[in-house]
Amino acid sequence: MSGRQDTPFRVEAGVSRARGDRIARFAGGAALALVVTFMLLPPLLIAVLSFSGDPYLSFPPESWGLRQYETLFSTSQWTDAIETSFRVAVPVALLSVAIAVPAIFAAHRSRLKGRHGILVAGIAGLIVPISAYAIALYGVLSQYGLLGTYEGLVLAHTVLAVPLVLVIGEAAMTRIPIELELAAMTAGAHRIRAWLGITLRVLSPAVLAGGLLAFITSFDEAALINFISGSGQTTLPKAILESARLGIDPVITAIATLLMLATSVLVAGVILLRRTAP
């Protein structure tokens, strides 16, 4: 006989395998849906509560409106904290980029002895627990009179954010062929001009992505600020924590909604920049 006939055993095994595949796909889809629901439900609930017109938290709200947003932008406690967070996060992002980019070039485009140790030392901050880092930094800043000052806060957040820029920038730098610079120098360009005109231009999307992550890290940082800020510097995360200690202020729902929206936009920008990086 030409061709092989399927026995009843083979047919039954194939049906069982197909049934098992369907059950596995259904179970996987159900688990994924449960995880997505668990992750999205709290943010959606907070966003809904931010449009409550009640002076207290309740679900469902008894009235609707923009009361929480109006209170947020009309109360100096919150507007001052938002301003402080921006005043800290912007220079932190700029300083992190200014420190990380030369370190990346020194590690990949120089003959400096121990140049790879620069990156290792810079990235090592990612594995240090934030509480241990905060306690050590508390002693350093108090010794130099920077505890509770704006400059000390910017310095602390910069040290916290630099490793993020290093990780993203270093990963992109390894994919930039050095032949591009050599071709520019062969055409008469100076080494520095080749770095700035060729390498840095190709590296810029990754640098911008790292800068955005540094900004987000500084703006959302809530643990370190309680150790080193004192009473003189109150960022938005610290104001939220202080408000939560006295009671749950419904204005927090408006703050959380705006932060989620802003963070989503910035993270989307980071992803787009990373896709354009080499």
Image (cartoon, grey):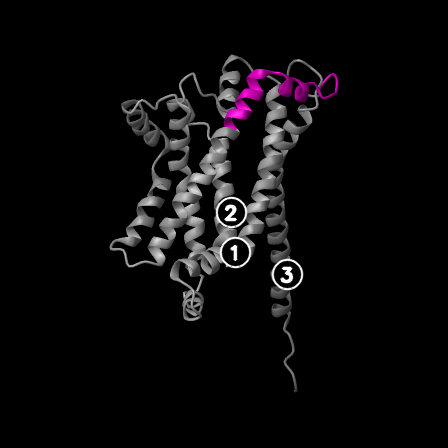
Q: Nearer the viewer, residue 141 or 49?
A: 141
Furthest toward the bottom, the residue is 1
Q: Which residue is mark 3?
A: 18
Tag in front: 3 or 1: 1
Compared with 109, 270 (above or below) is above
Q: Position of residue 152 (x, y in %)?
A: 37, 27
The reply to whether the magenta stretch includes residue 81 is yes
- Magenta-tinted stretch: 61-85
Q: Is residue 38 visible?
A: no
Q: Which residue is mark 2?
A: 209
Q: Position of residue 231 (x, y in %)?
A: 42, 16
Q: Which mark is residue 4?
A: none
- Going 32% across and 29% down the picture, which residue do you hit? 137
Q: Amino acid at mark 2?
A: Ala
Q: Nearer the viewer, residue 228 or 192?
A: 192
Q: Earlier in the sequence, mark 2 or mark 1?
A: 2
Q: Please, what secondary structure does the residue beneath circle 1 have?
A: loop
